[in-house]
Image (spheres, rainbow, N blue to C red):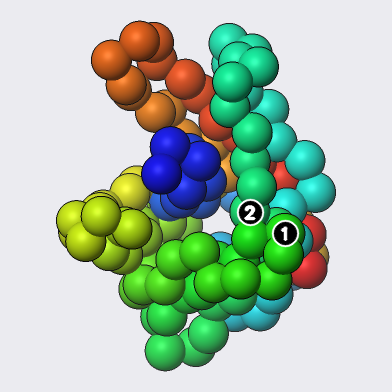
Amino acid sequence: MKQLLLFFFSFVLMSSCGSDDNDLRPADIIVGNWTIEKYKLEPEDDELEITLSNMVCDAASHFTVYTRYDDVAYEGTYEIGDDYIRLEYVDEDGKAQKILAQILDYSENTLVITYKYEDSKQDIKLTIWLKK
């Protein structure tokens, strides 16, 4: 569950570092299949590993996240603004989750998002680089 939360929280919170590519906005590019190119945990944590491989967002504000074995990990709805993305889904324990991620950078085919995950041990910042 921590892996999913880290992925989603990273995807949801977006900062106001926009792109100059043809005045694109995040809402203009979000629909499609996004693959996780790389991720960075701060501080580094050898116990955490991202096992999710890609996320598909459709025009009806629905998303599906897949594991690297092509199994559906999570499904839900998204809302996207110029500097954020908010995800809502039900986790594997049946609990409703809402995540807000910050957009650090984007272009027509790339999206960099970050999320600060707070748990009982430490605060973790997860940054994910996504590519279409």
Rate crowding at label 1 as few (under 14), some (14 to 19) or many (20 or more) other CA atoms within 10 Å: some
Q: In the rendering, which numbered label is found on residue 38?
A: none
Going 65% across and 17% down the picture, which residue do you hit?
A: 46
Instruction: For the N terminus, give its image quadrant.
Output: top left
Task: Identify which residue, 69 or 60, lies in the foreground.
Answer: 69
Going 61% across and 71% down the picture, which residue do you hit?
A: 71
Task: Identify which residue, 42 or 79, lies in the foreground.
Answer: 42
| Farthest left residue in view | 95
Q: Position of residue 86 (x, y in %)?
A: 35, 57
Going 39% across and 10% down the picture, which residue do you hit?
A: 122
Q: In the rendering, which numbered label is found on residue 52?
A: 2
Whether residue 106 is situated above or below residue 33 in the rendered picture: above
Q: Which residue is mark 1?
A: 68
Which element type, helix, strand or loop, lies under badge 1? loop
Residue 75 visible, this orientation: yes
Asked if the residue at tag 1 contacts the one at tag 2, i.e. Cβ–Cβ closer than 8 Å, the answer is yes
Whether residue 106 is situated above or below residue 126 in the rendered picture: below
CA separation, marks 2 and 1?
6 Å
Which element type, helix, strand or loop, lies under badge 2? strand
Q: Position of residue 129 (x, y in %)?
A: 72, 45
Instruction: For the C terminus, give its image quadrant.
Output: bottom right
Q: Position of residue 117 (x, y in %)?
A: 39, 28
The amino acid marked with disc number 2 is: Leu
The amino acid marked with disc number 1 is: Arg
Is 117 situated left or right of 41 in this image?
A: left
Rate crowding at label 2 as few (under 14), some (14 to 19) or many (20 or more) other CA atoms within 10 Å: many
Q: Position of residue 73 (x, y in %)?
A: 50, 64
